[in-house]
Image: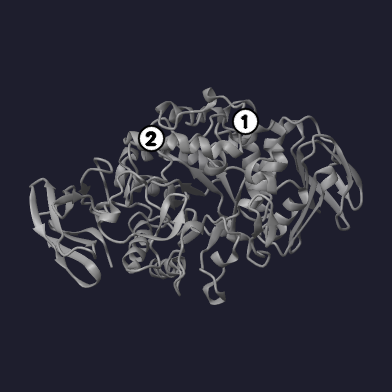
Amino acid sequence: MKIGASYLGNGTCEFTVWAPAHEKVSLQIVSPNNRIIPMEKGEQGYFKVVAEDVLPGTLYFYKIADSDYPDPASHYQPEGVHGPSQVIDHNSFKWTDVQWSGIPLEDMIIYELHVGTFTKERTFEAIIPRLQDLRDFGVNTIEIMPVAQFPGDHNWGYDGAYPFAVQNSYGGPDSFKNFIDAAHKQGISVILDVVYNHFGPEGNYISQYGPYFTEAYKTPWGSAINFDDVQSYGVRNYFIENALYWLQNYKIDGLRLDAIHAIYDLGAKHILQEMADEVAQLSETIGRKLYLIAESDLNDVRVIREKQFGGFGIDAQWNDDFHHVLHTLLTGEQRGYYQDYSSCEQLAKAYKESFVYSWHYSATRKRYRGNDASQQPAQQFVVCTQNHDQVGNRMLGERLSHLVNFEALKLAAGGLLLSPYVPLLFMGEEYGETSPFLYFVSHSDPDLVEAVRQGRKEEFADFHSEIDSDQEYSDPVSFSTVEKSTLKWELRNEGQHQVLLELYKYLIQLRRSLPALKNLSKETLEASAVDDEKLVLLHRWHQESHIFVAMNFNDKDVTFKANISGGNWNKILDSAEQKWMGPGYTMPNLLMEAQEVTIKPQSFVLYQKL
């Protein structure tokens, strides 16, 4: 069932809203000519009216029991979360990406981007001049953090109250389309981060319309979305329509589904399976593969397994285990959930099997967690060394560039891009950005503002000791926190930052040119570790192409025997070389079987079999 305001042309617009608990709903036209139009209630609680003399740009509310509320499926909120909704004509935009066919999942190099801190202008249009720079160093997919209308002008985006409406301060619907069109012309796919597990706390009038929430489950944000309780059919339709809306009207190439572990559905057909089915059908209709990628804390392969084998049929998922173990090896941190990760053996397992916790006991969670993902294709896992959560949920918003030295930053790049998985980079990572990424909001409710301040401090308790001073804490409501988090784009042309950028660029080139790296497969991969020496060794191959990688997470030289098959191996990258501003290399240019070699601290080396 289509919902919201659908402009039909010639001054005619169809309005549809789900309000099953009400007997009367009216359309309140606010501008340009104030009037009230009764709506007709149809099957399953959907109210409809086809209104004349309604042009694009018309502002409206729905009137329920003498109160005016914005459209829960509003396509635009030009005056913010409390203002009227606006009619949008999606057919009027002139797309120029007519030849666009998308990027296959297995070829993606994903770049996570936040509109409000990527440029000082904080708009979609301001991103466009930087697209060529992203493409030139290897990015072919941008994952954009949520753009659904949130209160105020600055927010991470996870407080959106209108899932169909493009944030007004970023530029609105046409500006978003301009950005996507420009990205496609540069050969870059766009994945949109969407939130289907909760609504933001301010400007959220959704409960005035129907039973969108259930008390059967609880989430970190309060009552859960009603996907399986009484009258859940309208709620399910709402979110499925939202997924299709972005893919159809904005030519989005895929959706990243936020925190699906907080989506509860015990029905016979899980909402994620139904959504995957609908998206697959749309893909067939338009002749272009559209992707769903889940953020999941479950370590459960049912999320990505095909539906004929009892899965939801989601295309891929984030793999936090990979991030956590790599982070602890690089930083030595052992607070919070990092206590569960510490060994090179775990990293070797992450390379080979994807999940570190595959029904193993977690000391932090105090329970067994995960299942076996070893048989799932490698391209179903998105991995990273940094992302908005892992950086922004730290009190000081530290990136890896704040936590480790330059040699370790290069090692992180190698650990990520030489993996058999789909890599995700967090904006600025490629050149060692020095701005933090802090948490920020712009709520207008004073009580809500104070609740956010206190809540964030409590969340930091596991990661920061009592000696951390309040002076270090950045107020999430202050605009200065947004300014602190804004990228220093010019750094990419300076010193070590430029060298790191060139290393990322070269590693991406190797992923695309060497068959052993280009072929994402766990079946053609061997991973081993020497924990005492903090050494991880990889062997990947595809047909006649073989590569060998040694990664030293130790702060001292490590001597070992290369566990490679017969023949000679030629070195093609050594992060310790002076070319990469390293201390100088000790690994030989030509490597032979069982040869004893020494690798420099916090470095990696890549060989290709001749």
The disc label shown at residue 392, or none? none
Q: Where is residue 230 in the image (x, y as percent from the top left)?
A: 34, 69
- Position of 550 with respect to 233 (left or right) is right
**Mark 1 element type:** helix
Left or right of 332, for residue 215: left
**Which amino acid type is marked by label 1?**
His
Residue at (48, 57) in percent of width and height = 262
Q: Where is residue 298 in the image (x, y as percent from the top left)?
A: 58, 59
Secondary structure category for the residue under label 2 = helix
**Position of the C terminus by quadrant:** bottom right
Which label was assigned to residue 449?
2
Query: Residue 319: x and y, percent?
Result: 60, 54
Judged from this view, the residue extending furthest toward the bottom is 308
Image quadrant of residue 171?
top left
What residue type is disc 2 on? Answer: Val
Of the 4 image quadrants, the one containing the N terminus is bottom left
Asked if residue 144 can be seen in this view, the reply is yes
What is the quadrant of residue 31 in the picture?
A: top left
Q: Name the residue under label 1.
A: 402
In screen coordinates, is 141 left or right of 287?
A: right
